[in-house]
Amino acid sequence: MTGYVQCFSPIDGSLYVERPLCSLDQARSAARAARQAQGSWAARPLQERIALVLAGVAEIGKTTDHMALELAHQMGRPVRYGGEFRGFDERARYMAEIADHALAPIIIEDSAAFRRKIVREPQGLVFVIAPWNYPYMTAINTVAPALIAGNSVILKHAAQTLLVGERMAEAFHAAGIPRDVFQNLFLDHETSLRLIAEGTFGYVNFTGSVAGGRAIEQAAAGTFTNVGTELGGKDPGYVRQDADLDAAVETLIDGAMFNSGQCCCGIERIYVHESLFEAFVEKSVALVNTYKLGNPLDPNTTLGPMAQPRHAAAVRAQIAEAVAAGAKTHIETFPADDGAAYLTPQILTQVHHGMRLMREENFGPVVGIMPVRDDNEAIRLMNDSPYGLTISLWTRDIIRAEEIGAQLETGTVFMNRCDYLDPALCWTGCKDTGRGAGLSILGYSNLTRPKSYHLKRA
């Protein structure tokens, strides 16, 4: 008997939705159908594929209010922030705009003697394993360009946001994308790994935990399947002596606390030049104390529950360990803090890198702030991490920002902003954050394979 995948709402812990899981045989059958449909999909003109993908995106745009409500129930983001359609639409449209250029053949020679060129062909069947924290935007990063490039796609969404894949499939099918070309499947981990180990896919994209990424790479070992991963993060901010202090406080603290800190590129540690440290902390504490923790369905709520009580428990444990080791907390417990999913946002000082709080991902509304003497100390501390996704520098000196950026082990260097994904730039990481390249012109490289033609004329 096939089991069920269930989503328990963080609002009150109740069962919000459940769906039956696919058996291994059902999943294999779906994959076969996807591979069979892929050839005729790839044979369609590029502009037709683009039009159908954008029509599917537009279908989803018709239900943005409903999207926000469902996301509040599934993962706790306050309805006041709406859904994710703006970023969802921006990313899909950008990848559509650059497709002609990104997928165009590279002509080496076209003479009376030879025609030599490199073309891009689809990988075939792409498997997208998407996370719950930004469930529409993270999924579309790969789904849109994969379909545009001529691949079939199977989407497996996280249990916490299992309706998202269903909504995307409904929209794309309504727009005219064949059902076998884009499929949303409810799969458990064991079935997903088994399919990967059998060499079912041409490309696998996974966003999630380091442990999950390792399991996927191990399953793919020996199959020569291309795997792209975006895993853990411990993204830092650095406020130099010449920074705009108010702007740095507003943006970095929002980057640490928005979505209850459950952001892949959220700010988890901040280093401030010692001359600005006390003022930065004072202003940060004042800002956090304006937040309202509560039911995400209330339009006045600015901070909802964490997606699951166990996630909040892990954050509380990091805070408690840091305090026991000498850290100082600055935020009194909020009235809505229930000791479970509803967690008081927290700022800590007197922290150091001997604490898990400053070394391991917390993925919650908490940030440690340390003073630093100079750029060299900040660079050393920012690089003192097993992760490398983004780093946020605050300075008025763009030349110095580039010089510092060259010394940082990270996928993206921000200056005077953070927690943002620009679809024109490659989304990537290093170290335990994983490997691969999403979005930008490089995003199409993972979703296609090169084929060379060396044609000698008679």
Image (cartoon, grey):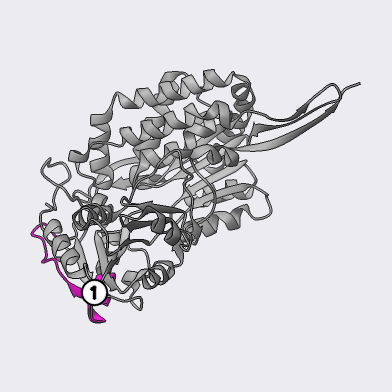
The reply to whether residue 153 is in sight is yes
37 with respect to 420 (left or right): right
- Per the image, label 1 sits on a secondary structure element best described as helix
Residue 368 x/y as whole percent:
26, 68
Q: In the figure, 134 relative to 306: above or below?
A: above
Residue 336 lies in magenta, yes or no?
Answer: yes
Residue at the spot 24% in from the left edge and 74% down from the top edge:
320
Instruction: State the residue in front, 321 or 451.
Output: 451
Instruction: State which quadrant residue 85 falls in.
Output: top left
Question: Which residues are drawn in magenta?
Answer: 318-337
Q: Quadrant of residue 105?
A: top right
Number of labels in the image equals 1
Q: From the viewer's side, name the closer residue of 58 and 289.
A: 289
Nearer the observer, 413 or 68: 413
- At 28% from the left and 33% from the top, the residue drawn is 67
User: Is there any visible trace of residue 390 in the rendered image?
Assistant: no
Residue 140: % across, % down: 43, 36
Quadrant occupied by the C terminus: top right
The reply, left or right, for residue 436 in relation to residue 265 is: right
Residue 166, how many percent across, how many down? Answer: 39, 33
Q: Residue furthest right?
A: 458
Viewer-proximal residue among 271 and 185: 271
Q: Residues within 10 Å of mark 1 (few under 14, many from 20)?
A: some
Position above or below: 161 against 48: below
In the figure, 60 relative to 297: above or below? Answer: above
Residue at figure coordinates x 27%, y 36% from the top left:
83
The kind of residue on which mark 1 rests is: Ala
In the rendered image, which residue does mark 1 sit on? 320
Q: Residue at x 11, y 65 (%)?
A: 333
Residue 139 forms part of the magenta stretch: no
**Residue 14 image position (x, y, % from top left):** 22, 48
